[in-house]
Amino acid sequence: MNTVLRKKKSGLCNPSTTVLKNMDFHQRGIFAVIGGPRIGFAFTLTQGQRLIVGSSPERDVQLDARGISRKHFSVYWSGDKIYIEDQQSSNGTFVNKRKITAATELKGGEQIKVGITTVLKCS
């Protein structure tokens, strides 16, 4: 089953402005870049999956912008919860303006700041 996330002109992460097809919100996490050079880029985290995000093309999700390490952070499922964890990045990973030093649960709506890029966990 393919998932399609497409940005409409009026914004991201709002059910009235984002088209989601074949999406079960209880089994996926949706992340969208809302600030920085890749604004509008989005990716999903399927239940049971772990994604490594960084500037290197070898990462699962590449965010190549100033201040992002080659292997910056990971997002993953543990049971029915989604967590984010810094991967010993040079500049740190911030969730709602707080630097994280351990695995941190994401419930939805958090802003994740890495370098000059801001990612919003939509659901």
Image: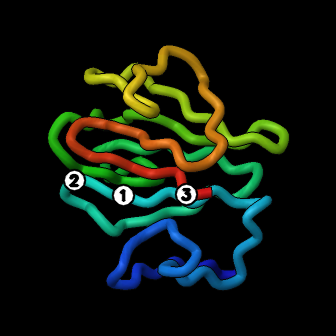
Residue furthest top as drawn: 101
Q: Please, what secondary structure does the residue beneath circle 1 have?
A: strand
Upstream in the sequence, badge 2 or badge 3? Answer: 2
Dot 2 corresponds to which residue?
A: 36
Q: Tell me the kind of residue under disc 3.
A: Cys
Q: Tell me the kind of residue under disc 1.
A: Val
Q: Nearer the viewer, mark 2 or mark 3?
A: 3
Compute the Cα span from label 2 to label 3.
17 Å
Residue 21 in percent (x, y) is at 65, 84
Q: Residues within 10 Å of mark 2 (few under 14, many from 20)?
A: some
Going by the image, does 110 lie left or right of 62? right
Residue 48 in percent (x, y) is at 76, 49
Q: Please, what secondary structure does the residue beneath circle 2 have?
A: loop
Compute the Cα span from label 1 to label 3.
10 Å
Q: Viewer-proximal residue, 90 or 104?
A: 104
Number of numbered discs visible in the structure rendering: 3
Quarter the N terminus occupies:
bottom right
Q: Tell me the kind of residue under disc 2.
A: Gly
Dot 1 corresponds to which residue?
A: 33
Quadrant assignment, res 8: bottom left
Give the residue drawn at x 33%, y 58%: 34
Compute the Cα span from label 1 to label 2.
7 Å
Q: Viewer-proximal residue, 18 or 115?
A: 18
Residues tagged 1 and 2 counted as in contact (Cβ below 8 A): yes
Dot 3 corresponds to which residue?
A: 122
Q: Please, what secondary structure does the residue beneath circle 3 have?
A: loop
Give the residue drawn at x 19%, y 58%: 37
